[in-house]
Amino acid sequence: MIFQGIDFHNVENLREGEYGFRMCRVPEEIRTQLDERAQEDVCFNATGVELRFKMKQDKVTLILHAHPEEEAPTCFIYYGAFQGGWEHSMKAISMGREDTEIIIPKAPNLKVLKQITQEQHLGFNPEVVRVILPYGKVDYVGIIGDVEPPAPEDVPSQVLLSYGSSITHGSLGLGTPHSYVFRLSQLMHSDYYNLGFPGCAHMEEALASYFVSRKDWTVATVEMGINMLSEEYETELFESRVDRFLEILTADSRPVFVTNIFGFCSPGSQKRAEIFREIVRNAVRRHKRDRLIFTEGLRLLNQPAYISADLTHPSLEGQWEIARNWYDIIRDTY
């Protein structure tokens, strides 16, 4: 959505609150059909949210506010596909009641960056400033300076949409540009929408229908299973959710790459995880079509050394492993 000359990428609506504008990643009519945690919390995560604009002057000041409960929120500054240079690549957002002002200069070395972009088919115009927000709660307060949103030709025409759990969301990747979704989109030279729902990727029918209704993506990835692994969810409920979710997605002609539960190290859940993996395998077989492509989660990540100390979430290296392995499959298939 466009607001104050900025493209709020991966944002469907803004809600004015105590600190600034909260950013919701799904439309209101979809949000209210999700579970309570997703409705009131996760939909407002800044997962995959970028503030994109082109500058009409030498510098602008962006004003953000991190909610007090967030942990070390950091935003990253890119010029098109290029990480910002010295002193202008990452900025901490203060926690508490104070706003954070971030001064952003125009891209340096623009002629060279444009040449590399063209030669390497990078997709993003380096004149486009991309402020990549952390995946916690960050509010937009305002901007000082003259900016305009990117034009369609300033961003890649191919777009990856990714749905899944906190692993898709990027938890413990040590920074939002290190999520497998972001890295996979880089390898594909595509844009992306990260619709990871940490703790509540419950595959609601409303979300599947929403994804199909959107015409702004060209290829999708879907991670299924780990957020319903606990005993509070009956196996039959998981199976029916997976089946209906895939049934809706298969009505669309665009390629959808599906996976089940990645490798993890927690010993108590391994048996149930294998049951859930089999449920996803069988569901894909039932809905088999050329553009529904299944890959085992264990094929994408099954390296214990690439799991963080919580025994569940991939580390930085694990996120990269998923991105590289899935890219090879997408490249060879799509």
Image: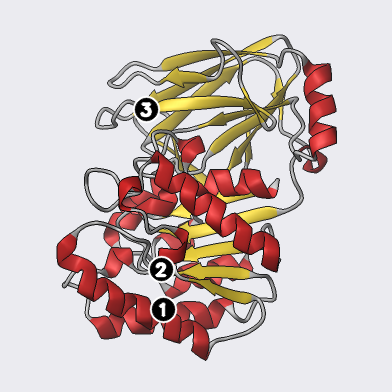
Report the disc number at residue 73: 3
Mark 3 lies on a secondary structure that is loop
Q: Residue 331: which quarter of the image?
A: bottom right
| Figure quadrant of residue 233 | bottom left
Disc number placed over residue 8 in the picture, else none: none
Look at discs 3 and 2 and give the one toward the viewer: 2
The residue sitting at 84% across, 18% down in the picture is 111
Front tag of 3 and 1: 1
Q: Amino acid at mark 1?
A: Val
> Measured from the top left, where is residue 313 in percent x and y?
31, 50
Q: In this view, which residue lies farthest toward the bottom?
A: 286
| Residue 136 showing in the rendered view | yes
Report the residue marked by disc 2. 224
Local crowd size for mark 2, using a 10 Å CA cut-off: few (<14), some (14–19), many (≥20)? many
Disc nearer the start of the sequence (3/1): 3
Q: Secondary structure at mark 1?
A: helix
- Amino acid beneath label 3: Pro
Q: Name the residue: 35% across, 69% down.
A: 225
**Residue at (67% x, 53% y) in the render:** 159
The residue sitting at 58% across, 86% down in the picture is 288
Q: Which is nearer the eye, 284 or 142? A: 284
State how the image is colored. Answer: secondary structure
Looking at the picture, does residue 73 appear above or below residue 94? Answer: below
Residues at discs 1 and 2 in contact (Cβ within 8 Å): yes
Between the C-alphas of marks 3 and 2, the distance is 28 Å
Tell me whether the residue at label 3 lies in contact with that at label 2, contact meaning CB atoms closer than 8 angstroms.
no
Question: Disc 1 designates what residue?
Answer: 280
Q: Amino acid at mark 2?
A: Met
Q: Quadrant of residue 291?
A: bottom right
> Of marks 1 and 2, which one's residue comes earlier in the chain?
2
Residue 19, given in percent of the width and then of the height, sits at 37, 27
Circle 2: element type: loop
